[in-house]
Image: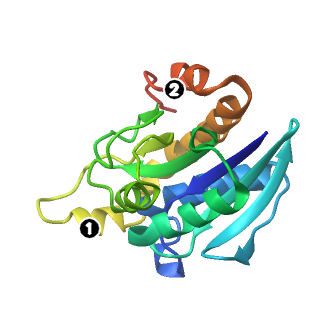
């Protein structure tokens, strides 16, 4: 069984480990845990991970967030992976930092990376793990907040949630999306 893990984010050092790049950080943590390594490939950094009889093609698109759909469409088609066997990890302003939400489908909720995917895949029916980043910013400062680094006091919880996200990916792949949703959707994460 083959899966496509998609971490959304922006390439470049100025974006590394920002709130908007949490998708990259989660996919990177999954690849590291399972002994994989990334290579530069078509439209993405790509790692192949084998775990529990399953193959994971892990991508971090190099197209920048707003064109993520180009990379996702290419790799879905190239690897012939059913959309229900994909999992997109994305930041979410509407969820507090203490929450995550896994869904089998849904709207882009104003997220440019998901909008690009929806346009190029022609559907909203693909699983996504929304990583709550909160919305603690002054009016008009959304872009600065999203593209900003985590506050020092947030970092331990972010690391904890990255670990939980990796476990959620594993549950999704071994026990299915319903079991994975039941494990995290109503949980408040704290330290």
Query: In the rendering, which numbered label is found on residue 181?
Result: none
Left or right: 65 with respect to 33? left
Colour scheme employed for the rendering of this structure? rainbow
Question: Which residue is label 2 attached to?
Answer: 184
- What residue lies at 64% left-to-right and 40% top-to-bottom? 85
Residue 138 lies left or right of residue 182; in this view the side is left
Q: Residue 178 or 165: which is nearer the viewer?
A: 178
Decide which of tag 2 and tag 1 comes sooner along the chain. 1
Q: Relative to 24, does residue 107 appear above or below in the rendering?
A: above
Q: Quadrant of the N terminus?
A: top right
Position of 150 with respect to 140 (left or right) is right
Residue at left offset 42%, top offset 65%: 149
* Disc 1, SS: helix
Instruction: Decide: few, some or many residues near mark 2? Use Cα within 10 Å; few <14, some 14-19, many ≥20.
Output: some
**Residue that appears at 53% across and 71% down:** 16
Image coords of residue 34 (percent x, y) = 82, 49
Residue at 80 percent across and 58 percent down: it is 48
Q: Position of residue 46 (x, y in %)?
A: 71, 66
Kindly identify which residue carries mark 1: 143
Count of all numbered marks drawn on residues in the image? 2
Q: Nearer the viewer, residue 76 or 29?
A: 76
Q: Callout 1: 10 Å neighbours few (<14), some, many (20+)?
A: few
Q: Position of residue 42 (x, y in %)?
A: 66, 76
Quarter of the rendering containing residue 39:
bottom right
**20 and 112: which is toward the camera:** 112
Helix, strand or loop at disc 2?
Answer: helix
The furthest residue to the left:
139
């Amino acid at each position: 069984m083959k899966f496509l893990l998609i971490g959304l984010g922006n390439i470049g050092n100025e974006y590394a480990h920002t709130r908007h790049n949490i998708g990259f950080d989660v996919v990177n943590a999954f690849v590291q845990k399972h002994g994989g390594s990334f290579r530069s490939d078509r439209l993405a950094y790509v790692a192949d991970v084998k775990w529990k009889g399953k193959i994971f093609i892990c991508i971090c698109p190099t197209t920048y967030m707003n064109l993520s759909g180009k990379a996702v469409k290419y790799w879905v088609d190239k690897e012939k992976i059913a959309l229900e066997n994909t999992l997109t990890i994305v930041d979410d302003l509407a969820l507090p930092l203490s929450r995550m939400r896994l869904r089998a489908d849904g709207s882009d909720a104003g997220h440019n990376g998901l909008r690009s995917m929806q346009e190029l895949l022609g559907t909203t029916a693909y699983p996504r793990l929304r990583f709550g980043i909160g919305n603690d910013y002054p009016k008009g400062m959304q872009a600065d907040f999203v593209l900003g680094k985590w506050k020092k006091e947030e970092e331990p919880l972010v690391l904890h949630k990255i670990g939980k996200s990796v476990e959620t990916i594993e549950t999704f792949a071994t026990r299915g999306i319903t079991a994975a949703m039941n494990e995290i959707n109503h949980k408040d994460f704290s330290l």
